[in-house]
Image (cartoon, helix red, strand yellow):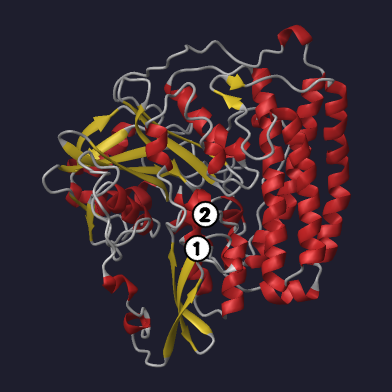
Amino acid sequence: MSLEPPEPELDVGETPDGELDYDELADLLGEHVLDREEHVNAKGFVIRPDSVETVLATLREEAGFDHLSCLTAQQYPDRYESIYHLKKYDDPTQELSVVVPTASEEPVSGSAAGVFDTAIWHEREAYDLVGIEYEDNPDLRRILLPETWQGHPLSNDYNQDQPQIVPLREHANPMEKRTQVPDRSDTMFINIGPHHPATHGVLHLETVLDGEQVVDVDPDIGYLHRCEEQMCEQGTYRHQIMPYPDRWDYISAGMLNEWSYARAAEDLADIDVPEYAQVIRTMAAEMSRIAAHMLAIGTFALDIYGDFTAIFMYSITDREKLQNLLEDLSGQRLMFNYFRLGGVAWDLPEPREQYFQKVRDFCEYMPGRLEEYHNLLTSNELFQMRVLDTGILPPEEAKSYGCTGPVARGSGIDYDLRRGDPYGYYDELEWDVITDDGCDNFARALVRLKEMEQSARIIEQCVDVLEDWPEDEREIQSNVPRTLKPDHDKEIYRAVEGAKGELGIYIRSDGTDRPGRFKIRSPAFCNLQSLEVMAEGEYIPDMVAALGSLDIVLGEVDR
């Protein structure tokens, strides 16, 4: 009997050093592979439109690609194209693109909905904005625009000047078609939102009740859709895109949003970032994370038992402390616009010692303050009665819906891009990834509280590094050309760990100084899909609690 530890089992196409063997993956897929494409960080396999479900099922079951991170759809002069961005929850550095071209005359493709539940919404969005139809998608209808909208805004032949008319049938009583679900005759349809205070923004929940229990809920989004992707496609890489990310998750998380674009564009254009700037970025990003989590916790308590005066005001007060630090750093309180391609806009505020002391004071204040949050919230009997064992999201369901961030980690999924796919200065610091296997509303709140403590640890270590940095080596930006023009048809998908999960950007260059395609992978968009699983069989107040535990922001959901 050998005393050596057993070798870990490898998925098909995985080498012992953690790299992907694309040749072996091609052999696994066999005749389904028509061609290959060289994307920057995730090589692509081109397949037939009728092979989508077979190929993705094979890659999930035999090669371990259990995370459909994103779906990008776009139109070329001679074809439409869908790109399924695949990762592994166990190792997000292992990435693969599955490219599905369809004819211009009849853009019809197979659906991935039979393999990944998250594909239902992704394909609905691709159909809505680009115009590709996905056969076998169980719910293929518009998702961001009204059903009566004429044309597809991101298609090449879209006429933005044509009038949009809403016919009278749009005002029909929704109960006529939603008063029943299969095998039920005593159900009731109700609308929650889009202006209900517990919907965290302009979200409309079409809800079917059996008595007081939820049997079906359909989130209706799009009320805050601004076509951010198209606006980014009309801006230049170097100067005009960076102000937009602050407006996606606008709840203090702007630094994290900016980093998602910066990481994708910098890798696309081969731009290095000075180490000093990486430390500043890391510190600023974790300040944004705490500020976002503070508001998430405060509004969650407000949703649960209307505690406006205590928990909510505690969290808003503490969030203001972060806002002050971020304002000192960037000059803004919400729309920071502080990151630049190749670094940051400017160095730390002077006098540096005074700013460092403010940051240290906050980091020292946090542990004791979080104990108060636990006393007021997680130890509160009323809070526990409302959130323990409600809003259950099993880990396999969370993976199928593409959940990330505290939502996934609250279901015991150890997935954090700061550690799993390191960027910035994270891999040089001591901190822990927080998970909880409770899978309920309580677990998701607990993860956020504990994550704030880890973020404070990261910030304090960044201050230690920055204090000792030699003055003549404080390089805040690398030399970046005034006009960036990446190579024609160069493609990349890159992501960071946002406040709500994996915030990713796909960019395809067309050889000009503006992206040919710009796609935003919103973690809140993906997490919201799981509400139906969490709410089924629950009472309405528990469904509201489940929604609050997702910490969605409609600016990021709709984009």
Quick one: label 1, few (<14), some, or many (20+) residues within 10 Å?
many
> Residue 412's quadrant in the figure?
bottom right
Residue kind at label 2, given as amino acid type: Leu
**Label 1 amino acid?**
Leu
Residue 500: percent from left, percent from top: 58, 49
Is the residue marked by circle 2 packed among few (<14), some (14-19), or many (20+) residues within 10 Å? many
Answer left or right for 131 relative to 426: left
Tell me what residue is drawn at x 57 percent, y 78 percent.
Answer: 540
Q: Are marks 1 and 2 in contact (CB under 8 Å)?
A: yes
Report the residue at 52% width, 50% height from top.
555
Q: Position of residue 84 (x, y in %)?
A: 33, 44
Q: Percent from the top left, x then y, of residue 303?
A: 67, 68
| Res. 492 visible in picture | yes
What is the total number of numbered labels drawn onto the structure image? 2
Tell me the residue that label 1 is attached to: 203
Depth check: give the residue in front, 40 or 155. 155
SS label for mark 1: loop
Q: Is residue 14 visible?
A: no
* Residue that numbered label 2 is attached to: 554
The furthest residue to the bottom:
186
Question: Is residue 7 rendered to the left or right of residue 325?
Answer: left
- Of 288 and 231, which appears nearest the observer? 231
Q: Is residue 300 left or right of residue 201?
A: right
Q: Residue at x 23, y 62 (%)?
A: 136
Residue positioned 60% across, 21% down in the render: 343
Cα distance, mark 1 to mark 2? 7 Å
Where disc 2 sits, the SS reads helix
Percent position of residue 533, x then y: 48, 69
Dot 1 or dot 2, earlier in sequence: 1
